[in-house]
Image (spheres, rainbow, N blue to C red):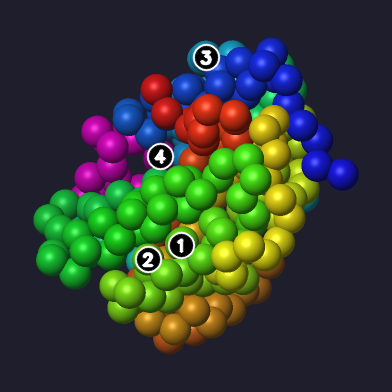
Amino acid sequence: MVPLKTAEDLKSIRKAGRIIADCHKEIARRITPGVTTLEIDRFVERFMMERGAYPAQKGYKGYPYATCAAVNDVVCHGFPDSIPLMNGDIVTIDMVADVGGWKADSAWTYAIGTQTADTSRLLRIAKLALRRGIAEAVPGKRIGDIGFAIQNCAQQAGYRVVDLFTGHGIGRFIHEPPEILHRGSPGYGERLEAGMVITIEPIITEGRPAVQIERDGWTARTVDGSRSAQFEHTIAITEKGPVILTRS
């Protein structure tokens, strides 16, 4: 059963989402060559705690950090570390904030220092794929409509979707039904209803979508070493259309 959220529930999730949005704005100012992802992780935890939120990823199934930090060929769930970021790197910072038991989730990919044309294009298409998916998140549509829009956007630009990882429902728990695939066929899958709150979080890669999980049990890296980018929002499905809850 997919838990549907009330208007009051959405207000609570939005509080968590706005804290995340504000945190990403601060990260964008701080994440430069020489900064480490461990420094960013500590900043995020402090930022949330000072605003009455808790970094819900920390401790989730034993995960030890407040954020996931995916650098270059790491697609997701990378551990923050003390290696300085270098000019030309890209890094995705993923976080979940909990305010009063309600959660919101968002990831953003940052280009470090000078961007090449290839980097700019990868990030632009990854953002566009997310927007195309969000546009399909309306009552009466199906999960396959979201996935098809994302997959089609990526493939038309010459990229692939890393389909091992999916979006999900969110609210009282980080992961709730339904599962949101980032590939699919129009008209297939579970029907979307007003009151659903989901994450849409496609990972777009320059190469093959195959990944391997490292010995830490979390870090997912592309097998061929290709880079990937990910942009994620928490979305409320309403009769008036999709509402982004992780935006200021």
On the picture, is 25 further left or further right than 169?
left
- Spatial separation of the CA atoms under disc 1 and disc 4: 29 Å
Q: Position of residue 77 (x, y in %)?
A: 56, 58
Which residue is at a point 73% across and 26% down the rendered structure image?
Answer: 5
Q: Is residue 164 magenta?
A: no
Residue topped by disc 1: 150
Q: Is residue 76 visible?
A: no
Residue topped by disc 2: 153
Query: Hey, what amino acid is under mark 1?
Result: Ile
Foreground label between 3 and 4: 3
Q: Earlier in the sequence, mark 4 or mark 2?
A: 4
Which residue is at a point 55% across and 78% down the rendered structure image?
Answer: 211
Query: Hey, what amino acid is under mark 3?
Result: Arg
Q: What kind of element bears circle 1?
A: helix
- In terms of depth relative to the viewer, which is nearer, 51 or 170? 170
* CB contact under 8 Å: marks 4 and 2: no
* CB contact under 8 Å: marks 1 and 3: no
Residue 64's label in the rendered image is none
Q: Earlier in the sequence, mark 3 or mark 4?
A: 4
- The region drawn magenta spans 27-40
- In terms of depth relative to the viewer, which is nearer, 61 or 13? 13
Query: Is the residue marked by circle 3 packed among few (<14), some (14-19), or many (20+) residues within 10 Å?
Result: few
Q: Is residue 39 magenta?
A: yes
* CB contact under 8 Å: marks 1 and 2: yes
Q: What kind of element bears circle 2?
A: helix
- Spatial separation of the CA atoms under disc 1 and disc 2: 5 Å
Query: Is the residue marked by circle 2 packed among few (<14), some (14-19), or many (20+) residues within 10 Å?
Result: many
